[in-house]
Amino acid sequence: MVRALIATTVRRRVGGGHYAPSMNAEKAEKIAVVGAGTMGAGIAQMAAEAGHRVTLIDTSQESVERGMAAITGFLERKVAKGTLTSEQCGGILSALDFTTDTDAGVDGAAMVVEAVFENLELKQQVFADLDRSCPPQVILASNTSTLPITQIASATNHPERVIGTHYFSPVPLMRLVEVVRGEQTSDEVAERSVALCEGFGKQPILIADVPGFIVNRFLCLLYNEAANLIHRGVASAEDIDTALKLGCNWPMGPTEIMDMAGVDVTLMAMEAMHEMTGEERYKPSPLLTEMVAEKRWGRKTGRGFSNYPST
Ligand SMILES: NC(=O)c1ccc[n+]([C@@H]2O[C@H](COP(=O)([O-])OP(=O)(O)OC[C@H]3O[C@@H](n4cnc5c(N)ncnc54)[C@H](O)[C@@H]3O)[C@@H](O)[C@H]2O)c1
């Protein structure tokens, strides 16, 4: 059923690799998402589930199709679990449109959310292009997890319409979005962004453009403390996880989370925080550096704080 619906959507292809959406979200504003990776696909799914027409944009047909396949798989699992009907699933998929043509993709959007690789130069280039393509009332939002919004906005002629909307993975399930005001973001753009995020079913918090925003400032300290305690032989990874799970009701322990997210990704985030803040407390634990050098990156390499023999 779901596959048939996708086939129908694909058959409605129009020029330039662009796929026409069918309907059912005419009243809600259109959202465009640039970057169809893990986060972009999740953001597109979230907005379509909230009743918006959404266009997902990437640089290659393969990438947009991978993004659409991720969304389809997620929705199919919801149908299998009985939390979504086939009809609802079909409605969401038909509100989603995908393209490799950015100008066509952003046409008519009220908000464009950027979710390309975490690289300042790339993001500045994407924002400069979006600034040229979109009329000034269109909100340009970045999903960056570490880069200053003010620096991204500096590549545009309208920095007042640039804002951060930092979602968490997996986007359709995580409730928080950090809405980050750059130095020149206007009050109107901040208010409209918060309202849109609420409409997406998320709980926004409006915050200043500080390194790590809120969540990553805390998480980096906690992860580093866990790694330092293990490095100094004070506690085992298992004991630290038990402590946080049973003493603080964390659903997972910090070393389990680092193994899942990637110890390499954790080290990169820590290095970025250390560089941006200049604060000693964010200096990466020597254990994280050692683990990354030894390819103990967590689940993805089969070894991290724990071993994952089947990976
Ligand atoms: N993965 C996470 O848990 C997470 C959480 C919060 C925020 N973020 C942030 O979200 C952003 C995206 O992360 P991700 O994990 O989805 O990355 P990803 O590597 O899964 O996807 C990035 C996508 O961007 C595409 N892309 C690159 N250049 C492009 C361009 N010029 N135009 C259009 N598409 C382009 C790539 O082809 C790729 O499909 C990053 O800024 C990251 O820091 C990630």
Image (cartoon, helix red, strand yellow):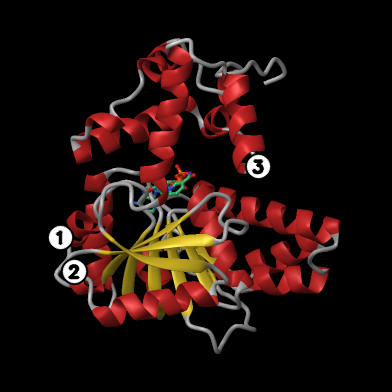
Tell me if label 1 and label 2 are in contact, CB under 8 Å.
yes
Mark 3 and mark 2: Cα distance apart in space: 39 Å
Instruction: Give the amino acid at mark 2.
Output: Pro
**Residue in the image at 58% along x and 56% along y:** 174
Local packing at callout 2 (Cα closer than 10 Å; few below 14, some 14-19, many 20+) is: many
> Which quadrant is the C terminus positioned in?
top right
Question: Which mark is drawn over residue 94?
Answer: none
Residue 136: quadrant of the picture: bottom left
Kind of residue at disc 3? Pro
Quarter of the image that includes the N terminus: bottom right
Determine whether 161 is above or below 254 in the image.
below
The circle on residue 251 is: 3
Residue that label 2 marks = 159
Q: Is mark 1 on a helix, strand or loop?
A: loop
Query: Which residue is found at the position 64% from the left and 64% from the top?
Result: 10
Residue depth check, mark 1 versus mark 3: number of the one nearer the observer:
3
